[in-house]
Image (tube, grey):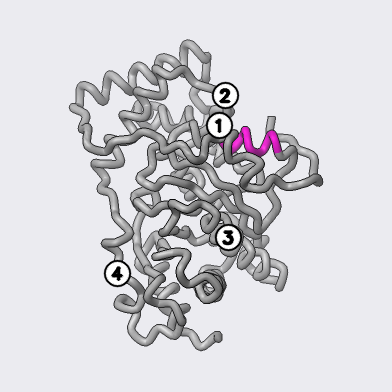
């Protein structure tokens, strides 16, 4: 299902916009809490469907016994992109939205701009940039960026800790289904530096920008082509976001710095420089671009990048 021809034309946003109903807001509410008994009943029903109606098997690499909620996530991680019954999706939506509300949703306007956060920042548009440390799935930015692989279908490793897995797991299987429809129509893998957009489903964001960053084998030797393609990923996401009127805030994960091996310090400099240059060309298009660091150590790398004399 995931095999594609290597070459061929790439889809433009308008080629798939209607296909994935990009302009139809997905119904969601983060105000409906679940009792423990309601949560347990929903999880049991969802597992019963996947294990019995679909005949899915528990992945061999999972530790047994495993918590039912983790098992549900693992099964959805490995499930191929096929439509699911509306009743299943409604129950899963309620579970995911209740869990998101429990984690706490972060509004972009509550994240101070870098002009306040980072004294002595040398970037030109520190008033339009922000830095936030935490889980990107909690951000209610208009669009969040996913560091995807070339198939755009998400991470099929059960319970893997990558941002791709986290975003797909929190959004729900509709995200993988949309990516599958886009890639099936495109007929080829997404190239490094490219990007596509879907709705965000059960995430507090409205859209997800899926981009393919460069792979640095072993995380050691960074070539010019790696730098150019990483910058292209940032530009592709911003260019794509600028074509949807409702998008005023974009949150970036640290593209390529996980399993793809790009050194964090250099990646942060490229990210900050590229975003700063893009904002210089379109200063009124976006209100805020947020760099999301997963740890305080990662956040310090961005702070250093904003103070660096690389201009």
- For label 2, the SS is loop
Q: Position of residue 50 (x, y in %)?
A: 46, 18
Q: Characterize the local packing of mark 1: few (<14), some (14-19) or many (20 or more) Cα atoms within 10 angstroms.
A: some
Asked if disc 2 and disc 1 are in contact, CB closer than 8 Å, the reply is yes
- Label at residue 112: 4
Q: Nearer the viewer, mark 1 or mark 3?
A: 3
Q: Nearer the viewer, residue 51 or 311?
A: 311
Single out the residue that lies furthest toward the left. 35
Q: CA distance from mark 2 to mark 3?
A: 30 Å
**CA gap, disc 3 and disc 4:** 24 Å
Closer to the chain start, of discs 2 and 4, is 2
Q: Which residues are magenta?
A: 177-185
In the image, residue 226 lies at what x, y percent?
Answer: 68, 67
Mark 3 nearby-residue class (10 Å; few <14, some 14–19, many ≥20) = some
User: Could you say which is closer to the camera, residue 287 or residue 143?
Assistant: 287
Residue 143: in sight, yes or no? Answer: no
Identify the residue under disc 3: 239
Mark earlier in primary sequence (1, 3): 1
Disc 2 designates what residue? 82
| Comparing labels 2 and 4, the label whose residue is closer to the camera | 4
As measured in the structure, the alpha-carbon distance from the residue carrying label 1 to the one carrying label 3 is 24 Å
Of the numbered discs 3 and 4, the one sitting upstream in the chain is 4
Instruction: Indicate the position of residue 98 as horizontal and vertical percent values.
Output: 27, 35
């Amino acid at each position: 299902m995931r095999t594609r021809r290597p070459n061929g034309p790439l889809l433009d946003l308008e080629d798939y916009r209607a296909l994935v109903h990009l302009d139809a807001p997905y119904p969601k509410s983060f105000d409906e809490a679940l009792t423990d008994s309601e949560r347990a009943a929903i999880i049991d029903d969802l597992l019963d469907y996947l294990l019995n109606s679909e005949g899915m098997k528990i992945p061999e690499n999972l530790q047994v016994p495993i918590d039912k909620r983790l098992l549900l996530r693992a099964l959805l991680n490995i499930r191929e992109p096929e439509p699911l019954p509306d009743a299943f999706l409604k129950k899963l939506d309620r579970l995911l939205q209740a869990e998101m509300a429990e984690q706490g949703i972060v509004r972009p306007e509550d994240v101070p701009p870098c002009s306040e956060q980072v004294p002595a920042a040398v970037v030109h548009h520190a008033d339009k940039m922000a830095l936030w440390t935490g889980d990107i799935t909690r951000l209610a930015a208009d669009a969040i960026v996913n560091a995807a692989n070339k198939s755009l279908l998400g991470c099929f490793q059960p319970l893997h800790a990558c941002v791709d897995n986290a975003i797909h797991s929190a959004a729900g299987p509709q995200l993988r289904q949309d990516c599958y429809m886009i890639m099936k129509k495109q007929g080829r893998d997404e190239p490094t530096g490219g990007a596509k957009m879907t709705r965000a489903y059960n995430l507090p964001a409205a859209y997800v920008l899926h981009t393919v960053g460069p792979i640095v084998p072993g995380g050691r030797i960074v070539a010019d082509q790696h730098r150019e393609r990483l910058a292209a990923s940032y530009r592709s996401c911003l260019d794509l976001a600028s074509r949807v009127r409702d998008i005023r805030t974009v949150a970036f994960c640290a593209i390529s710095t996980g399993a793809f091996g790009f050194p964090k310090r250099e990646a942060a400099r490229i990210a900050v420089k590229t975003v700063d240059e893009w904002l210089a060309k379109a200063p009124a298009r976006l209100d805020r671009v947020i760099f999301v660091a997963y740890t305080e150590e990662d956040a310090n790398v961005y702070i250093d990048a904003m103070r660096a004399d690389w201009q």
